[in-house]
Amino acid sequence: MNKAEFVSAIASESGLSKVDSEKALNATTEAIKSALAKGESIQLIGFGTFSISERSARTGRNPQTGKEIQIAAKKVAKFKPGKALDEAIN
């Protein structure tokens, strides 16, 4: 499902127009990005939790040459599904 299909699904479920649904989706994703950028986690009961995890620096290997390379430390976004979502997909 791409963004346009997702906006259509939101519009049909909520009764909002597609324009309003897209505004709501954009506002939601921006709020999630903003909170994660601040280091906060977002917990949506029944759906799941968005959080930040830190990966430490490590030594990797270039698959083409086999040469060792240094991989820098970085933060990554994580999502852990909630119980209701987990049950819905299983």
Image (cartoon, grey):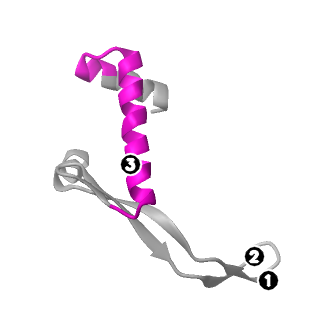
Q: Is residue 44 magenta?
A: no
Relative to the observer, which residue lies in front, 54 or 83? Answer: 54
Q: Quadrant of the N terminus?
A: top left
Disc 2 target residue = 62
Q: Which residue is pictured at 61% across the width and 84% down the height?
A: 58
Which amino acid does the dot numbered 2 rest on?
Answer: Asn
**Horizontal and vertical percent position of residue 8:** 38, 21
Secondary structure, mark 3, is: helix
- In this rendering, position of residue 62 left or right of residue 90: right
What are the residue bounds of the magenta stretch?
Answer: 11-40
Q: Earlier in the sequence, mark 1 or mark 3?
A: 3
**Horizontal and vertical percent position of residue 44:** 23, 50
Label 1, label 2: how far apart the Cα atoms are? 5 Å
Question: What number is the disc on residue 67?
Answer: 1
Label 3, label 2: how far apart the Cα atoms are? 34 Å
Label 1, label 3: how far apart the Cα atoms are? 38 Å
Q: Which residue is pictured at 41% across the width and 65% down the height?
A: 52
Task: Single out the mark in the foreground, 3 or 2.
Answer: 3
The answer to whether 42 is drawn above or below residue 25 in the figure is: below
Disc 3 target residue = 32
Q: Earlier in the sequence, mark 3 or mark 2?
A: 3
Secondary structure, mark 2, is: loop
Quick one: label 3, few (<14), some, or many (20+) residues within 10 Å? some
The answer to whether 26 is drawn above or below residue 75 in the figure is: above
The answer to whether 39 is drawn above or below residue 71 in the figure is: above
Which amino acid does the dot numbered 3 rest on?
Answer: Ile
Secondary structure, mark 1, is: loop
